[in-house]
Image: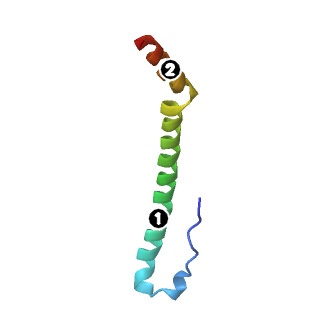
Amino acid sequence: MSALPHIDLSAIPEDQRDAVAALLRETASLKEINNRLEHLVAELNRVVHGKKSEKLDEERAIARH
């Protein structure tokens, strides 16, 4: 996972610091969610397209003939 850039909040105007900090937290949270979704999609692809599914497709083709 790529790390968020370090931002020196003291360089940001005081009235905007809380908003920037909240956006950084939200971005980190969204990256975690995205990583989890990518993992689940990869697992699903393995289930759908793995070796066992290839065998099942071959068995279906043989059964049709």
Relative to 61, residue 33 above or below: below
Give the residue displayed 49% in from the left and 41% down from the top. 40
Considering depth in this image, is 32 or 62 the residue closer to the camera? 62
Q: Which mark is residue 58?
A: 2
- Identified by mark 2, the residue type is Glu
Quadrant location, the C terminus: top left
Q: Residues within 10 Å of mark 2 (few under 14, many from 20)?
A: few
Q: Which mark is residue 47?
A: none
Measured as percent of width and height from the top left, residue 13 is found at 44, 88
Measured as percent of width and height from the top left, residue 21 is found at 47, 73
Please tell me how many numbered marks the rendered image carries: 2
Relative to 43, residue 31 above or below: below
Q: Which mark is residue 27?
A: 1
Q: Earlier in the sequence, mark 2 or mark 1?
A: 1
**Element under disc 2:** helix
Q: How is the image coloured?
A: rainbow
Measured as percent of width and height from the top left, residue 59 is found at 49, 16
Quarter of the image for residue 17 reads bottom left
**Element under disc 1:** helix
Measured as percent of width and height from the top left, residue 3 is found at 59, 65
| Pointers 2 and 1 in contact (C-beta within 8 Å) | no
